[in-house]
Image (cartoon, grey):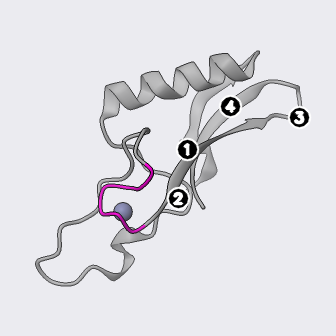
């Protein structure tokens, strides 16, 4: 999974704007993928696949990974939010 897909989305001038855009993205998608998502790598037969993270809970859908927002800075000084397992 490329990091480009996980940036929400275009660069923003402030950290607040980056966070708002990320929250909006979640509202539109319900479940989002996150950096470090490996929940479905070892699925057993009949096990429900993890859809990702809802942007609010402390864990992803299946409960396997703890996820939170991080704001990161681009080299041009703009910001983006990324959902990351930690
Ligand atoms: Zn999961």
Q: Is residue 72 above or below residue 46?
A: above
The residue at 55%/44% (across/down) is 6
Q: Earlier in the sequence, mark 2 or mark 3?
A: 2
Residue 60 point in image, percent of width and height: 38, 55
Report how far apart the C-alphas of labels 4 and 2 lie in the structure: 17 Å
How many neighbours does mark 2 have within 10 angstroms: few (below 14), some (14-19), or many (20 or more)?
Answer: few
Which residue, as the protein is rendered here, is positioned at the far left? 46
Q: Which circle marks residue 75 in the picture?
A: 3
* Residue 62 as seen in the image, left or right of residue 16: left
Determine which residue is flagged by label 2.
1
From the image, give the main secondary structure of the stretch colored magenta. Answer: loop
How many neighbours does mark 3 have within 10 angstroms: few (below 14), some (14-19), or many (20 or more)?
Answer: few
The residue at 67%/18% (across/down) is 16
Residue 56 point in image, percent of width and height: 42, 39
Q: Which circle marks residue 80 in the picture?
A: 4
Label 3 with label 4: CB-CB less than 8 Å? no
Report how far apart the C-alphas of labels 1 and 2 lie in the structure: 9 Å
């Amino acid at each position: 999974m490329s990091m480009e897909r996980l940036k929400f989305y275009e660069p923003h001038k402030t950290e607040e704007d980056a966070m708002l855009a990320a929250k909006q993205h979640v509202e539109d998608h319900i479940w989002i993928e996150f950096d470090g998502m490996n929940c479905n790598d070892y699925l057993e037969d009949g096990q429900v696949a993890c859809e990702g993270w809802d942007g609010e809970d402390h864990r992803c859908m299946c409960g396997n990974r703890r996820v939170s927002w991080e704001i990161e800075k681009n080299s041009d000084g703009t910001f983006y939010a990324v959902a990351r397992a930690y």
